[in-house]
Image (cartoon, rainbow, N blue to C red):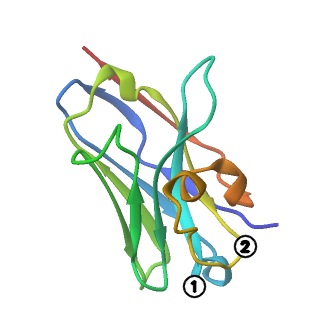
Amino acid sequence: QVQMVESGGGSAQAGGSLRLSCAVPSNTYNNNCMGWFRQAPGKGREGVAVIYTGSFTTYTADSVKGRFTISLDNTKYIMYLQMNSLKPEDTAMYFCAAASHFRCPEAMDLALHPATFAFWGQGTQVTVSA
């Protein structure tokens, strides 16, 4: 079983910043599509940003573009999500995910779709107050 562990969630005021981290097993990390998703109460799981570890190619949802940045630390097998200019509508449970060792799909809607990913973390809560 692949164990992915998120950390860094918490509370922030609107306009503030948080950074999420996801520790990924090394045999899952290499040459794989990985990403961040979020799910607000009563809503479906939404793709936020994805990255291919082989080339650092990224895809970012329009709702967070210019505010959120996905990145990698290849020496520690950690994926990050830097969240700036937070809004109350960013409040959700955030999950990291990994595919089964393939490149991220070229089509954005597939790259950001939960069905592309096989392995999931347990989630970390982000709450943004107005």
Mark nearer the N terminus (1 vs 2): 1
Quarter holding the C terminus is top left
Disc 1 element: loop
Q: x, y (%) of residue 38?
A: 53, 38
Q: Is residue 45 above or below residue 81?
A: above
Q: In which quarter of the image is residue 32?
A: bottom right
**Mark 2 Cα shell of 10 Å, populated few (<14), some (14-19), many (≥20):** some
Determine the residue located farthest toward the right in the rendered image: 1
Q: x, y (%) of residue 78?
A: 46, 70
Q: Which amino acid does label 2 sit on?
A: Ser
Which residue is at 48% across, 85% downward?
54
Q: In which quarter of the image is residue 43?
A: top right
The answer to whether the residue labelled 1 contacts the one labelled 2, judged by CB atoms less than 8 Å apart, is: no
Q: How many marks?
A: 2
**Mark 1 Cα shell of 10 Å, populated few (<14), some (14-19), many (≥20):** some
**Left or right of 45 on screen, residue 36:** left
Determine the residue located farthest toward the top in the rendered image: 130
Q: Which amino acid does label 1 sit on?
A: Asn
Which residue is at 35% across, 43% downward?
62
Number of the label disc, if any, that sits on residue 2 = none
Which residue is at 44% across, 57% downward?
21
Quarter holding the N terminus is bottom right
Q: x, y (%) of residue 24?
A: 58, 70
Disc 2 element: loop
Q: x, y (%) of residue 25?
A: 63, 75
- Identify which residue, 23 or 71, lies in the foreground: 71
Q: In this view, does 20 lie above or below 116?
A: above
Residue corresponding to mark 2: 100
Q: Distance between the residues labelled 1 and 2?
A: 10 Å
Residue corresponding to mark 1: 31
**Left or right of 14 on screen, residue 39:** right
